Image (cartoon, rainbow, N blue to C red):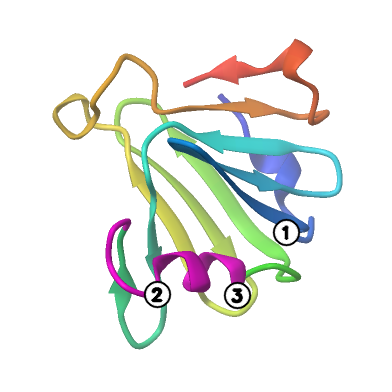
Amino acid sequence: MDISAIEGEELEAVEFVEDYLQLRFEGPLLTFYEWPSVLLEEFSISFGEPGYRDALCALIGEEVEQALLEDGSSLTVKLANGAVVALSLREEDLSGPDAGAYSETGSAADMVEF
């Protein structure tokens, strides 16, 4: 699946919805059913660790430099400030059949799960 449409887009919102996460851009929407890690210059942080939500929210306003989804391997979103939102898509790292979903328009009608 190609998620490169978010490249050059600014992260407009980080939405925590019960047991999943959404990253909203000017149009596209990236939904995570698994919690991604946030890789910063100084350290990385994962769900459940103090400061996780703050680290994600601090990315609001940053532009996406590169977005790559490699089926069965990983999803990475690199931002202009050097931060990376990363998720393993290896079967042994997932708790369910799908790790997330992507909509190029931001509409639930065209969501494609990965």
Which callout, 2 or 1, points to the residue nearer the camera?
2
Residue at image location 43% in from the left, 35% down from the top: 19
Name which of mark 3 and mark 2 comes first in the sequence: 2
Residue at image location 19% in from the left, 35% down from the top: 93
Displayed quadrant of residue 111: top right
Q: Looking at the picture, does residue 69 appear above or below residue 78?
A: above
The crowding category of the residue bearing disc 2, from other C-alpha atoms within 10 Å (few below 14, some 14 to 19, many at least 20), is few
Task: From the viewer's side, name the closer residue of 25 and 80.
Answer: 25
Left or right of 102? Residue 43 is left
Disc 3 and disc 2 in contact, CB within 8 angstroms: no
| Residue corresponding to mark 1 | 11
Residue at image location 57% in from the left, 35% down from the top: 31
Kind of residue sitting beneath label 2: Gly
Residue at image location 37% in from the left, 37% down from the top: 34
| Residue corresponding to mark 3 | 58
Q: Which residues are magenta?
A: 47-57
Percent x, y of residue 62 = 71, 71
